[in-house]
Image (cartoon, rainbow, N blue to C red):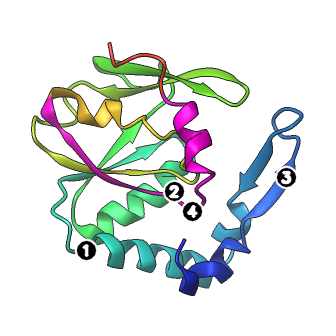
Amino acid sequence: MNEPAYHLKSLVRTIPDFPKPGILFRDITTLLSNPAAFKETLQLLVSRYRDVELHAVCGIESRGFLIGAPLALELGVAFVPIRKPGKLPAAVERVEYALEYGMDSLEIHKDALQPGQRVLLADDLLALARVGDLSEREEGREEGASALHTPDPTRARARAPATRPR
């Protein structure tokens, strides 16, 4: 996060040993409960991506919805949810990825994005560094990722998805 927004980072609570021992959970509910801080966060993200040609913001379940939906609205682009398995009603593509504490997977509707569309991934924590595989299918392009907290990028890349979308 850039220097002017450092005070916003201080509003993200760290909870040790959640959901498992050794994990530092970054809780954004403390930031979201402060309307001025939440608004400033969204304004910073909008200003960063306002001049980028985007077709959609893809929000990663579920905290990415809290950031992605208002960001898409402000940018005047579509919002596309990326969800946990079994939550989307139509045909989906899936990506599996490794977490610090195990494996997980996410899904996106197969028809949510068209070839060549440019998307922004939104999440509260950019630990899912390459979940962009879901948005990049069929020649789509991930144009960036917005997050409220970014861990050490070398560690995030080590947890990149284990498989490509199915």
Q: Element type at marker 3?
A: strand
Q: Check disc 2 and report the residue beneath it.
A: 66
Q: Amino acid at mark 4?
A: Leu
Residue 116: in magenta span: no
- Alpha carbon distance from label 3 to label 2: 20 Å
Q: Amino acid at mark 3?
A: Ile
- Specify the segment rendered in magenta: 139-160
Q: SS at mark 2?
A: helix
Q: Where residue 151 appears, x then y in whole percent?
A: 63, 52
According to the picture, the residue beneath numbered tag 3 turns out to be 15
Q: Position of residue 107 (x, y in %)?
A: 40, 25
50 lies left or right of 67: left
C-alpha separation, residue under disc 3 versus residue under disc 4: 16 Å
- Identify the mark nearer the N-term, 3 or 1: 3
Instruction: State the residue position of label 4.
Output: 148
Residue topped by disc 1? 50
Mark 3 to mark 1 CA distance (whole Å): 33 Å
Taking the image as shown, residue 38 lies to the left or right of residue 134, namely right
Foreground mark, 2 or 1, reads: 1
Q: Quick one: label 2, few (<14), some, or many (20+) residues within 10 Å?
A: some
As helix, strand or loop, the secondary structure at mark 1 comes to loop
Q: Amino acid at mark 1?
A: Arg
Q: CA distance from mark 4 to mark 2?
A: 11 Å
Q: Residue at x 31, y 20 (%)?
A: 92
Count of residue discs: 4
Decide: marks 3, 4 in contact (CB < 8 A)?
no
Say left or right for 111 vs 25.
left
